[in-house]
Amino acid sequence: MFEKLKRWIFSLQGKFILVASVCILIFTVAGGFIILSREENLYRQDLINQGSVLSEISRLMLTNVMVYNELGIMDKQDLIDYLDYFIMNFMERDKRVRYVAVVDNSGWIIAHSDIAEYGKLCSDEATLRTILTLETTITDGSFQNEPIINIAAPLNISTKRWGGLRIGLSTKEVQKSIDALKKEITVLAILFSMISLVIISVGAGVLSKPVISLSRIMDGIKTHGDLEQQYIGLKDRKDELGKLQNSFLWMLQRLRDADKERKKTIEVLAQTEKMVSIGRLASGVAHEINNPLGGITLCFKNLMETQVDSLTREKLILAINDGLQKIKGIVEQLLDFSKMTVTEKAPANLNSLINQLLVLLNYPASKKNIKIVSELSEDIPEILIDENKMAQVFVNIMINALQAMDGGGTLTIRTAKDNGLCVVSFEDTGAGIPPDIMPNIFDPFFTTKGVGEGTGLGLSVSKGIVEQHGGIIEAESMQGVGTIFRIKLPMEDKRC
Ligand SMILES: Nc1ncnc2c1ncn2[C@@H]1O[C@H](COP(=O)(O)OP(=O)(O)OP(=O)(O)O)[C@@H](O)[C@H]1O
Ligand SMILES: [Mg+2]
């Protein structure tokens, strides 16, 4: 699960969706925040403006009353009654007003919405400053745990001053509106983010689909070497991705052609190498044929030139037939081995294949004073092989072994079953392979033999054939002691 998520995050689509989502998140949060703070300021400013207008109107009304009092039209008690009436009326008309206070020039409260405040000295610095500077001051504060805006306005006409008026306006309604706005913006931001994400995911899917298909094809080539796979999921496109797709398919076609060429070359090389092996075997084969031929000629001469009884005649005919059968067997082996055709894989027994090939190798071996020992396990099952090709592998290895044992020696051929594999080993007592050339022996054209003696293709062709059969070929050698080549082939048809 975690691995899957990790793979998705590092994919083109994942990265694109993640980056786009982060961008959307940043933009919606930042946008929401900017809109909210702007609206909050607007609401607050609106409240301050309304409060200022209210305080201005009240200020005008109250200064009028102050003038009446000054002129004696209204006595002090009337003034106080009027102020109380004014405050009560004011608070009833506007429910946002939390308190109203009127203070005299010395800062004593002469009227207040809260009766307990009457006659007290005003402690609010902003109000005292307003009385002194004759300028309206607006401050934030709280009243009975409720956030409010305090507006302090001077009561004066020109330089004649009577004190100040202080009004507390609740911001509760404003806060309510802001909270509602916050909710609205949050819902909108979530909706917007979700819709954008869906659009981005669909867009990323559409855009990355051809790239994913191409990378899947690449994966197929990388892991299975499958150049012939079908291009499922690739559609004709006119955009840059279409161009990339076309270039990729063109490149793949070139690869396929090159691969076909390579396979053809390998086939040709293998065939050439086979011809070389046949050439190497030819002198031995000629000798193998020559021996029975000599016998046949002698028998034939006896038959033709001398009078023989019927028993001897029958013996001579049988000997001629024996010789001919032997020649037939050898020629058949050589023809079989030299077959150009690519045969299909078919169940075959490795032991009988080795025995057939030994017919061709016995003479060259005996000529070099080399003993061939075969320890073939009866346990070996039939396995699916291309007999012709496998014969080529065995002959290559056996010729190498004979070539390595110039002063005579022993070539031991073994077959065995090991861990679900059929193992064929060829052990010689030859010169061995120096460790420094060991890593190169399977390279094409690598040879330590003189011109005309070796092409350097034997082992590389053999390795290719064994791998085509899903098997492996290994070499182990010690200089001066000998070399073992092991071929391990899978028992595909599970007959063992
Ligand atoms: N049994 C062996 N003992 C010692 N050296 C060996 C043996 N088998 C292979 N080699 C070394 O590996 C080299 C490569 O072998 P390979 O069969 O590929 O080519 P080659 O025998 O030189 O030429 P050819 O193409 O004719 O077979 C040989 O030249 C030889 O040095
Ligand atoms: Mg060779």
Image (tube, rainbow, N blue to C red):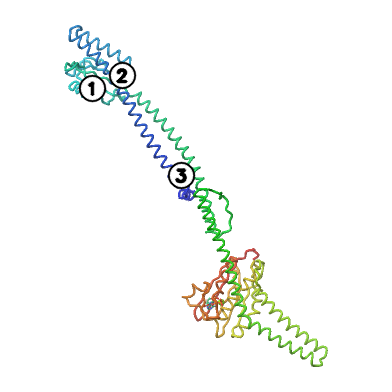
Query: What is the spatial separation of the Cα atoms under label 3 and label 1, in whole angstroms?
Result: 55 Å
Residue in the picture at 39% in, 29% down: 181
Task: State whether residue 366 is above or below residue 464.
Answer: below
Which three-letter amino acid code belongs to the residue tagged 1?
A: Thr
State which quadrant residue 285 falls in.
bottom right
Which residue in the structure is indicated by mark 1?
136
Looking at marks 2 and 3 on the same chain, the residue that comes earlier in the sequence is marked by 3
Front one among 198 and 469: 198
Query: What is the spatial separation of the Cα atoms under label 2 and label 3, in whole angstroms?
Result: 52 Å
Query: What is the spatial separation of the Cα atoms under label 2 and label 1, in whole angstroms?
Result: 17 Å
Task: State whether residue 105 is above or below residue 190.
Answer: above
Which residue in the structure is indicated by mark 2?
97
Task: State whether residue 117 is above or below residue 449.
Answer: above
Quadrant for the C terminus, please: bottom right
Looking at marks 3 and 1 on the same chain, the residue that comes earlier in the sequence is marked by 3
Which residue in the structure is indicated by mark 3?
17
In the rendered structure, the answer to whether residue 154 lies left or right of residue 276 reads left
